Amino acid sequence: MSDDGPVVHGAEAGSDSGQTPPGVPRHRLTVPHLRQLAHGGGGRDAVAALRTAQRSRRLVLLRALVETVDRDVPPDAPWPSAQTAWDLLAEAEAADRAAVEAVLLHPPVGSWLARVLRGLRADAASAPEPEVWQDAAQIHALAAAAALAAGIPFRARVPVLGAGVLFPSLGWAVLPSAAPPPAEPVVEAFRDDHGAGVRCHTGTVRLPDDLGGDAPGWWAIRRLRATHAGVSSAPVLEDLDPWRHYLRRMPVERLGEDEVTRWRELYRAAWRHVAAQHRVDPGGVADCLLALTPLPDRSPADLFSGSAPESYGGFLMSRPSSALDLAAALVHEAQHIKLSALLDLVTLLRGGLEETHYAPWRADPRPLRGILQGVYAFLGVASFWQALREGTGLSDAERAQADFEFALRRGQVEEGLRTLWSEASLTELGEHCLRAMEHTLTALLKEPVPAAAGQAAEEARDDHRTVFRLSQLSCDPDRVRAWADAFEGGRPPPHRYPEARPLTGPSAPEVRTRLMRIRFGDPERFARLREDPPTLAGASVPDYAWAAGDRAAALAGYRRLVAEDPADPVAWAGLGLSLPEGRARDALLHRPELVAALHRELLRRGLDQDPETVAAWAATPSDGVTARGWGVGGRPARM
């Protein structure tokens, strides 16, 4: 990436034929844009290039759907050919390309397309399920939405979903009286000289001139609007589209006005944090965030957010407890959206699909492609927290939270990058991009953090890694028995440590890090929670003691929990974290799966040894092999 010439990848899709005619220009991502993105940033011009490529990708998939449906559709299907929808889409695009692009790139459209195409091609030996054909008919509603957005006259037969008609990116028309009977699964959408509407056997729903506002029989798509420092963001608040969740179909569930108001207030407050910082271009972030799908609330300390490559610009989120948490989540999802779109244009690594690698931000094993996604996303998040630390206007608690989150995220990125360098098969461009990310990270690693935040972040990473190893790795039973024989016989440990292998078991909760976030970000709430420990699901009394810094009480509590349940990974990890420096702590933090398995084998033999004694013995050097001899820095990248 040493020159400013274009990097050429991917062909522009023709919207009139679905094929790429000779001479049609290919998508171009310039070196400056690629450099911005590789360093973890990316402004509006770079994101616009990604968006253009996503538009073409969406059209290619739509054309594939048209051809598949019209070739294989059942002869008794009640809707017209998919080609008629394609023709209406092309007519609308000729009238208003920007309006139609907004419909095409509505994130649930991508989820719908991917799911329907998978359903149509799931089993070549048998016909698709009837539901797949019904879902495929939604292409007519998509074309009608494009025509409505472009303002052109039209008539189209569109499918009924439940008791209404969904116009993607625009809203939901509620049919009069009741949903049509099965004899009328298709109704007519239109725009004529008298306006737009939907006509069925029970009557006609007239759509308002302004489709952005509710009206009788019309639920408009609502938005979250925010402007700060001259940068605006206005993602859809998506609660209507059945395909708004990239993993499962969801019912139409209109959010109440109070909930919408809470989201809008929270988004405006969060956007002030995003727009005020300079390390991750807020304009690029804004242009990545097209649609937010709210999910049922979780614990305020357990915010969930997620996105998928097939639904470019869309992200799921449970409502966070603070504007800061939402701001960080917005940057996080924007990073995922950028990288996913970039990976549709370029190849950074080969293979990397095996879910056998440790990710310091996930409770389950991940493929290298997932590690790359996490590194890129959390690099942006770490940059965001650092930008906040450089600014003013934060309360003491917010600054303490920023210190902790910054230290935690940059450490996770460092560990993830080390995994990619040691394990991934990178292309030349992939190496360039990783070096750019490493350059950004190197600058972040030089930034000082308060000792309390730095130590808490390091212990949170140790905790995560230890719980992961205890819940996701197992040792060869024969080797464990050999170690138990040596312990029982009073001999030193064997010369070789048992190899850790993947264990198909449930992941364990990250309770202590959740508590640390509350302790730093909301100390008054933490104090209240500690008075009533069961309030936070999954947390125990020793967890609260550990997060509060009372390691003596935590150690006593974890000893009791391990005695009660020797298979509890969270209790074992807490025990290791609470021990003073020494061989026992070293072994429990770097080879916990061996110590726990050895302890259980000794219990099976009737030898009730205390866990610390077992851990200290397992860490005794033997032929030059010490407890820190597993993997890179005691933190193996591969299981």
Image (spheres, rainbow, N blue to C red):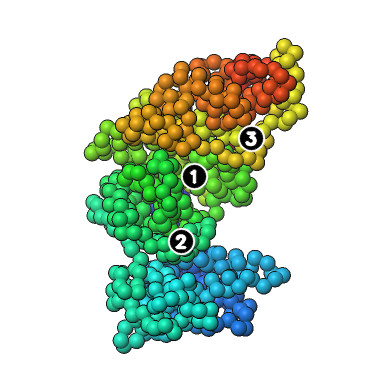
For badge 3, the amino acid type reads Leu
| Front residue of this view, candidates 112 and 488 | 488
- Residue highlighted by disc 1: 374
Q: Identify which residue is drawn at 39% across, 78% down.
A: 176
Count how many numbered circles sit on residues in the image: 3
Q: Identify which residue is drawn at 39% across, 73% down.
A: 174
Q: CA–CA distance between discs 3 and 1? A: 21 Å
Can residue 404 be seen here? The reply is no
Q: CA–CA distance between discs 1 and 2? A: 23 Å
Element assignment for label 1: helix
For badge 2, the amino acid type reads Arg
| Front residue of this view, candidates 190 and 542 | 542
Q: Using residue 250 as the reference point, say whether residue 423 is left or right of it.
A: right
> What is the number of the mark on residue 473?
3
Q: Earlier in the sequence, mark 3 or mark 2?
A: 2
Mark 3 crowdedness (10 Å alpha carbons): few <14, some 14-19, many ≥20: many
- Determine whether 367 is above or below 260 in the image: above
Whole-percent x, y for residue 367 in the image = 59, 46
| Front residue of this view, candidates 348 and 530 | 530
Q: Using residue 72 as the reference point, say whether residue 582 is left or right of it.
A: left
Element assignment for label 2: loop
Quarter of the view holding residue 328: top left
- Residue highlighted by disc 2: 244
- Determine whether 340 is above or below 81 in the image: above
What quarter of the picture does the C terminus occupy? Answer: top right
Do tag 3 and tag 2 residues touch (Cβ < 8 Å)? no
Mark 1 crowdedness (10 Å alpha carbons): few <14, some 14-19, many ≥20: many
Tell me the mark number nearer the camera, choosing from 3 and 1: 3
